[in-house]
Amino acid sequence: MCVDPDWMPFEKIAQGKHIGMSADFMRLFASRLNINIVVTPSGSWFESLKQGEQRQCDIFSLLMATPERKKFLDFTQAYLEFPLVIAVSYQQDYINSIEEVLDKELGVQKGYAYAELLQLQYPDIKLIEVPSLNAGLDKVSRNQLYGMIGSLPDISYAFQERYIGELKIAGKLAQQSRLGIGTRNDEPLLVGIFDKAIASISEQQHHEITNDWIAIKYVSGTDNTLLIIIASVLTLMMLFVLYRYWRLRENNSRLRHLSLTDKLTSINNRMKLDQQLDEVMHMAKRYQHEFSVILIDIDHFKNINDEHGHLIGDYALKTLAQLMLRNIRAVDTLGRWGGEEFLIICPGQTEQGGRLLAEKLRNIIDQYAFEFFSHLSCSFGVAAYAKDPSVNALLKRADAALYKAKNQGRNQVCT
């Protein structure tokens, strides 16, 4: 296993031992799978990534999926998810969205996934690579950088040690740091094995591990009993307030997730797709960003329902959704458009790029061995943004391309 040797509270190599949130999770996974996991030492996260590319490790304990990493890794479902935030000096204003600071120099740690994803989504963003989080925060405190981007836990952890009164978290990005296990893609069974291990962890176990590392721990070196009692009472009060706040946010987050997720397939629903379409259209018009959309329709879906029943039809929709989700880029958005139709939004993709992705998916679906029937195919309509006056105008072109594919015999891609 490759790890990040200095990324607390997520993980760290301390005196040759793997510690942190991911270390506790990996020990739990190893116990569930009855296997021995050995850490491959490295001097930096960048060095760990190089070791993974050279097949010197079989798995990564904790990382995000990116197009570059998918060249040598498969990715499990995320078992940790936190928002990305921007740390700035106390003199700076609150940041409502990242679009407000695209012209500012923002620090990111070298080799970290969100740098690649942000650069893809915002080509004009001014990202400055730094060797470590503290190195970036030091530059912010000396006004050599406007801000430092990182996940909420690692920046909060750094603030506990230093920077109190100097820096503040001034904004939360829409992007999330979704962290799972990376497995070498020349051993395809590994990703399924670790997905099962992640699924076996209860919500209570998950909370126990994360709370152990995110909660602030107090250590007293002297016998200041009264101070300890006062500090303990204040800490308990603070923890209670934080717990109530966390529960409220968790409930709101769960409700928001349910409102934006298709109940059957567990991918994005029409409401979420509409939001994403408005966002990429806005970026295209304001910054001349390219993007394309792919409409997908299952061929002869009615026959599946008629011959095998609606439960098998539901199986087809769910299996197809997960099959496509595993084979698109991390920056792409897949959702159920309605009935047996799906939509993929592809930021930064030209019409040719969209067509290549659609053809890749068409071929994967065409060759996939479904469990309850012998074959399923899809037709694809692709359209790229071409200064369309509205989202509806772009979708109308994609819909026309889809019907063209249907009329020409199905199981094909048209633009």
Image (cartoon, helix red, strand yellow):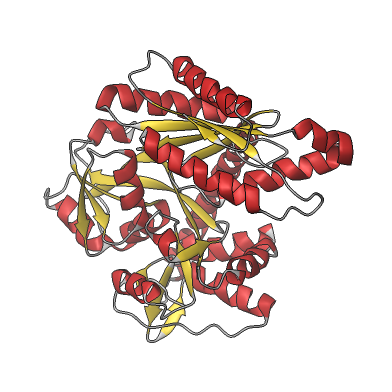
For this rendering, which residue is in front, 156 or 255? 255
User: Seen from this angle, which residue lies furthest top?
Assistant: 389
Q: Is residue 228 above or below residue 404?
A: below
For this rendering, which residue is in front, 363 or 11? 363
Q: Is residue 131 above or below residue 43?
A: above
**As drawn, is 46 to the left or to the right of 8?**
left
Residue at 12% x, 48% y: name it. 143
Inspect this view and state whether residue 346 appears.
yes
Q: Where residue 84 sits: x, y (%)?
A: 39, 47
Q: Where residue 405 sits: x, y (%)?
A: 57, 29
For this rendering, which residue is in front, 120 or 235? 120
**As drawn, is 17 to the left or to the right of 135?**
right
For this rendering, which residue is in front, 106 or 93? 106
Q: Where residue 334 sits: x, y (%)?
A: 54, 38
Q: Where residue 273 sits: x, y (%)?
A: 53, 29
Inspect this view and state whether residue 220 appears.
no
Residue at 45% x, 48% y: name it. 329
User: Seen from this angle, which residue lies furthest front?
Assistant: 408
- Looking at the rendered structure, the number of numbered marks drawn on it comes to 0
Residue at 61% x, 68% y: name it. 194
